[in-house]
């Protein structure tokens, strides 16, 4: 038994080699990476260009503290991000991961209002079905009951509204459009309940990942959200840590919702697993208000803007854009959806198959017609994970889909380079793992 401890005390296989869509362990077993870990490995595991970029950067400059220097790697990554970012996004703050990016976003929003003469704006509104990170500020924003419960006394109070979750929350006979507007209007009601003058920001994932299994909003939902935020002077923070960087078929997921945020966070796919990196991007308006006010964002970490991480991020982004991977994500994503529907669409314990691009979710239910979730004590999601590993598949099953405690889903987020044949392998292995988990 080793001395490292992590999220599980179970004895985990030791990963020794990654190649394309596969990870090999020390026992010689091979796993198809059907979820890119947790939507991380978008280019697969041994990309030659990213490896070369990291080596070249290492030979030139590993580290220069951002209190003293900027670097070519950080500047060129930021330029490339801004060039392809949603309208209005103009500045980039580089960090080391998703939680750090969300923390920075919340603090930036606060400082913006302090410097624009609205110090009473401090409240954050988020959605119940959400995960924004494990550090205390990001955990406070998240709405997953199970993740929050133990730490509740340490968390800053945040209000949570319902997510946009068509499979469960759209009413019989209600159109998707009417449902989207009704769901978005919950934000306005919550702003009014709290008093708009006290609300700083609304934060949401355009496509909900870890807590829900790739749930996109219905058309029109985010446009209405944007209008409500504007009407009340509330900043819109979109958390694209999981769904960003091309995962849904456009570089930023919010492009498909037709909205631009005031602040957006990205991470996982930006480093693609080659380096820990995240980023918080904001509009010129926010940046300039602070620049003209106190002068600088009062934040920082020793490793933010790390040149090696930035070089990796730049190489990943260059690969996504230069190799034309976005159309491929859309095409293979449609293929994955069709393959899942063919194999699992009529399964008595599959309630919903959804998502965008190569970001897909399968919701598991005890009763398909009544949409009844499995008893959490059955630990269906943990069993799916175990049997999938046994079948040689990495997927990302989780619980709490419905209310943070009940409901199971499996999240799929394979590398963008996955072939149709490998998608067939993924779906076959997943289907066997689901059957074994339910039978166990
Ligand atoms: N936001 C979202 C939407 C996430 O999915 C995650 C990670 N699952 C985070 C934030 C936190 O990122 P990290 O684990 O890199 O801190």
Image (cartoon, rainbow, N blue to C red):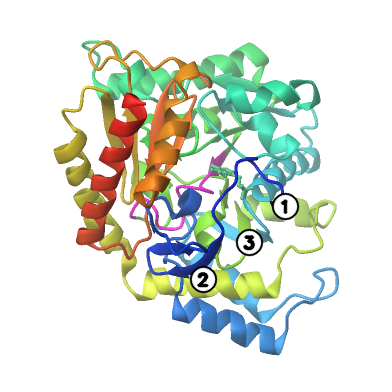
Note whether residue 157 is visible.
no
Residue 195 in the image: state x and y as whole percent: 67, 16
**Most foreground residue, 137 or 69:** 137
* Mark 1 surroundings within 10 Å by alpha-carbon count, few (fewer than 14), some (14 through 19), many (20 or more): few
Point out the frontmost of discs 2 and 1: 1
Residue stretch in magenta: 237-249
Marks 2 and 1, how far apart in space?
37 Å
Residue of label 3: 276
Q: What residue lies at 63% left-to-right and 28% top-to-bottom?
A: 147
Residue 212 in the image: state x and y as whole percent: 44, 31
Marks 3 and 2, how far apart in space?
18 Å
**Magenta stretch holds residue 248:** yes
Residue of label 2: 80
Earlier residue among tags 3 and 1: 1
Residue 339 in the image: state x and y as whole percent: 18, 45
**Lateral position of residue 114 relative to residue 379, left or right:** right
Earlier residue among tags 3 and 2: 2
**Lateral position of residue 190 relative to residue 316, left or right:** right
Q: Quadrant of residue 170?
A: top left
* Mark 3 surroundings within 10 Å by alpha-carbon count, few (fewer than 14), some (14 through 19), many (20 or more): many
Residue of label 1: 4
Residue 266 in the image: state x and y as whole percent: 55, 53
Q: What residue lies at 42% left-to-right and 47% top-to-bottom?
A: 389
């Amino acid at each position: 038994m080793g001395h490292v401890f992590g999220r599980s005390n179970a004895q985990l296989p030791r990963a020794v080699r990654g190649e394309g869509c596969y990870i090999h362990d020390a026992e010689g077993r091979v796993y198809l990476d059907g979820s890119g870990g947790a939507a991380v490995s978008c280019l697969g595991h041994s990309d030659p260009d990213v490896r070369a970029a990291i080596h070249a950067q290492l030979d030139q400059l590993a580290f220069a503290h951002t209190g003293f220097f900027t670097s070519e790697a950080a500047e060129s990554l930021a330029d490339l991000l801004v060039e392809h970012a949603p309208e209005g996004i103009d500045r980039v703050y580089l960090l080391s991961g998703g939680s750090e990016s969300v923390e920075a976003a919340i603090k930036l929003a606060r400082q913006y209002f302090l410097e624009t003469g609205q110090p009473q704006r401090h409240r954050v509104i988020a959605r119940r079905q959400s995960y924004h990170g494990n550090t205390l500020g990001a955990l406070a924003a998240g709405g997953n009951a199970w993740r929050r419960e133990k730490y509740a006394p340490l968390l800053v109070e945040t209000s949570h509204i319902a997510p946009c979750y068509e499979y469960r929350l759209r009413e019989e006979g209600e159109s998707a459009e009417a449902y989207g507007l009704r769901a978005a209007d919950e934000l306005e009601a919550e702003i009014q309940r709290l008093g708009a003058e006290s609300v700083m920001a609304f934060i949401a994932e355009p496509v909900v990942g870890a807590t829900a299994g790739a749930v996109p909003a219905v058309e029109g939902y985010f446009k209405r959200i944007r209008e409500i935020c504007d009407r009340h002077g509330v900043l819109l923070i979109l958390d694209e840590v999981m769904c960003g960087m091309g995962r849904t078929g456009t570089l930023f997921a919010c492009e498909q919702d037709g909205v631009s945020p005031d602040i957006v966070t990205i991470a996982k796919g930006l480093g693609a697993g080659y380096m820990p990196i995240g980023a918080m991007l904001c509009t010129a308006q926010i940046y300039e208000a602070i620049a003209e006010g106190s002068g600088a964002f009062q934040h920082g970490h020793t490793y933010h803007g790390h040149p090696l991480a930035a070089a990796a991020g730049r190489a990943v982004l260059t690969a996504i854009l230069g190799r034309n991977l976005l159309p491929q994500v859309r095409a293979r994503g449609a293929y994955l959806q069709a393959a899942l529907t063919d194999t699992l669409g009529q399964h008595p314990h599959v309630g919903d198959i959804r998502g965008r691009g190569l970001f897909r979710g399968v919701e598991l239910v005890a009763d398909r017609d009544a949409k009844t979730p499995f008893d959490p004590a059955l630990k269906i999601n943990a069993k799916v994970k175990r049997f999938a590993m046994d079948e040689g598949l990495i997927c990302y099953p989780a619980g709490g889909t419905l209310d943070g405690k009940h409901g199971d889903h499996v999240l799929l987020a394979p590398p963008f380079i996955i072939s149709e044949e490998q998608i067939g392998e993924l779906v076959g292995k997943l289907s066997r793992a689901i059957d074994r988990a339910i039978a166990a």
